[in-house]
Amino acid sequence: MEPNATTGNETSVTQSPSSAAADAASKASVELFELCAALLLGLGATMGTIAGYQGGLWSGKSIESFGMSSRITTKSADAGTFADSKIASDNLVKLQVIQLVTQAKHTPKDDEREFLLHQISELMIREYSDEAYDAMGLPQEPRKMYDADGELLDLPEDVIFEASKQNFNKDYFQWMYEEKVKHTVKAEELFAEGQHAGTVGDEFALNGVYYTLSLFFAGLGLVFKSRVRWGFFALGAIIFLGALVYMCRLEWA
């Protein structure tokens, strides 16, 4: 009986070192995994925060551009309304000028005719807008004199008659709506900038989702004690690297 007891003791003694080595290896493996998982979780959280910050910056730019576009669009509408009112006023003046010219042509050359021509000159110089006056090709000296000191110099009769036959050319309407067009173009540019900023902000938000997925799989691996945890870690690491490459290709604010 004594030899058997000795043999059993020797067996237990020889198994103890291998069991201790296995335990040590298992513990080292767990510590390595926890270290790798902690690094991935930290990096994922950090990069996700950066992606969220960039997304916020781009969203702010988008809102600012849209707001400025809206304000300039209002200015464009106001400029268009003002141009419409000036055009309507010029057309009314032109109608009055045509009526007076027709009357003057059928009036003998006397004081009444001179009075009619004076009224026409006063209408053209005082009531026409600058754009209409230039579009009619009227002389600038009487207009400048009136603007400077209020003195009204009658226009020559042939100039009056010739101007009454003309219609407002395309340059006239281009001048009238120049301010409106300028504001419209600027508003469209700002709106396009807002759309671009919104798109980039959405891309950073999507990038944040990718980082969240990498955190999910890395954290899920900590639940398992078998080797399957490395599979979850690898999946989280792949998603993290893909999100990192994707973010590096984005436009930063």
Image: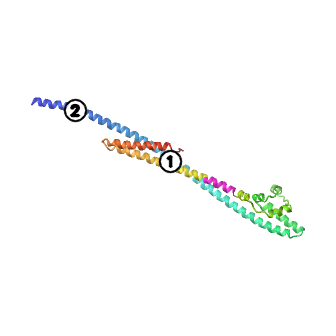
* Residue 232 visible in image: yes
Give the magenta range: 177-188
Horizontally, residue 116 falls left or right of residue 68, namely right
Q: How far apart are marks 1 and 2 (CA)?
A: 58 Å
Residue appearing at x 66%, y 56% in the figure: 181
* Residue 121 visible in image: no
**Front in this rendered view, residue 22 or 42:** 22
Q: How many labels does the image show?
A: 2
Q: Position of residue 107 (x, y in %)?
A: 87, 70
Q: Main secondary structure of the magenta part?
A: helix
Which label is found at residue 16? 2
Residue contact at pointers 1 and 2, CB within 8 angstroms: no
Check residue 184 for magenta coloring. yes
Horizontally, residue 134 falls left or right of residue 191, namely right
Residue appearing at x 33%, y 42% in the figure: 229
Element carrying mark 2 = helix
Element carrying mark 1 = helix
Q: Residues within 10 Å of mark 2 (few under 14, many from 20)?
A: few
- Vertical placement of 166 versus 18: above or below? below
Quarter-of-image position of residue 41: top left
Q: Where is residue 120 in the image (x, y as percent from the top left)?
A: 82, 64
Horizontally, residue 42 falls left or right of residue 202, namely left
Q: Position of residue 42 (x, y in %)?
A: 42, 41
Which label is found at residue 55? 1
The numbered mark, 1 or 2, whose residue comes first in the sequence reads: 2
Check residue 118 for magenta coloring. no
Horizontally, residue 184 falls left or right of residue 11, namely right
What kind of residue is marked 1?
Gly
